[in-house]
Amino acid sequence: MNILLAMIPAFFWGTTYAVTQYTLTDWPPLLLGALRALPAGLLLLALKPSLPKGGDLPSLLKLGLINIAAFFCLIFIMAQSLPSAISGVGMVSVPVFAMLYHWLVHKHRPTFIQALSGAILVMLAWLLFSPSQISLDPLGLLAMLCAIMCIVVGSTITKSLGNRIHWWTVLTWQMILGGCLLSVIAIVDASASPERYSAVINHFSIRNGAGLLWVIGLNTALGYGMYVWLLQRMTVVDFTFGGIANPVAGIISGLILLGESFTSFQYSLMAGMIAMSLLPQIVLAIRQNKPLPNTD
């Protein structure tokens, strides 16, 4: 049952790209990032008030910069420049980058199945993102690469902070601090390019409002709230199985909202990438649930 619940936040996260293109077209990514982060952080703070210690603020500020400010901005750049399905499926390559990062930085060698799955995933991604298969915006691909690195580095910082700061405080204050940083930068950007922001205000519509409610309420406040709640009741490995809903949601929402369609070969490459991203967790789960041999 918990794995089915884990699919709910993953599904909402996967719809970010299509919902943004459909309802918030041409909105400045900095503004979208600030609107996504700060209200959600304040809502989490209202639900369970917490204050970090003064000595923890620099670490939380760094986490908010990487995990929220940079990541949210990059996500919305992807959402406005890449097909929804490509964004959702491309993000499943996070395990490969995490594996390489921990191998190079922390000298943690990957297992054989991790290395094999990573190699196949890279090969499938190379075929899917090949210019001969599909034309993609280089800016969107660069944003995807940077967003993946934000996840890898941010997760490492989050894990280290979890040893001395309560997880709810980490979650809440990275949202608030990251949202404040994005708000300040968005104000500076608005002063430099006021026409982009004035267009948002002057042409605000019901569709825009619905998109904001989806991104702020369901995608962020509910999604991240369920994420931290579920991690207290299941292992990280089990939670990753729910992550399959993320790229699937990207594909489905792109098809329904934006009319995106791909060839059978491209869909097969997407399915292969999803399968390879889950394979190491499946093998690990099977090994952990394998009964001990009878020594009687």
Image: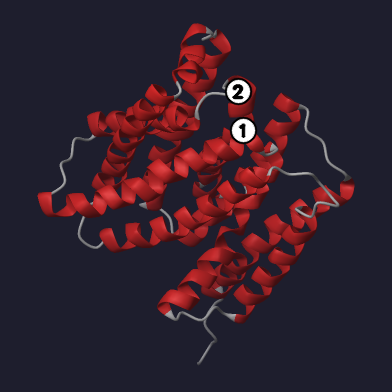
Which amino acid type is marked by label 1? Gln
Q: Residue furthest left?
A: 54
Q: Is residue 40 left or right of residue 215?
A: left
Residue 197 seen in the current view? yes
Tell me the quarter of the picture where residue 49 sits: top left
Q: Residue at x 44, y 81 (%)?
A: 107
Number of callouts = 2
Image position, residue 153 (x, y; %): 42, 60
How many residues crowd around disc 1 within 10 Å: few (fewer than 14), some, or many (20 or more)?
many
Residue 15 seen in the current view? no
For mark 2, give the secondary structure.
loop
Which amino acid type is marked by label 2? Thr
Depth check, front residue: 138 or 106 = 138
Disc 2 to disc 1: CB gap under 8 Å:
yes
For mark 1, give the secondary structure.
helix
According to the picture, the residue beneath numbered tag 2 turns out to be 25
Q: Is residue 127 above or below residue 39?
A: below
Q: Is residue 164 left or right of residue 32?
A: left
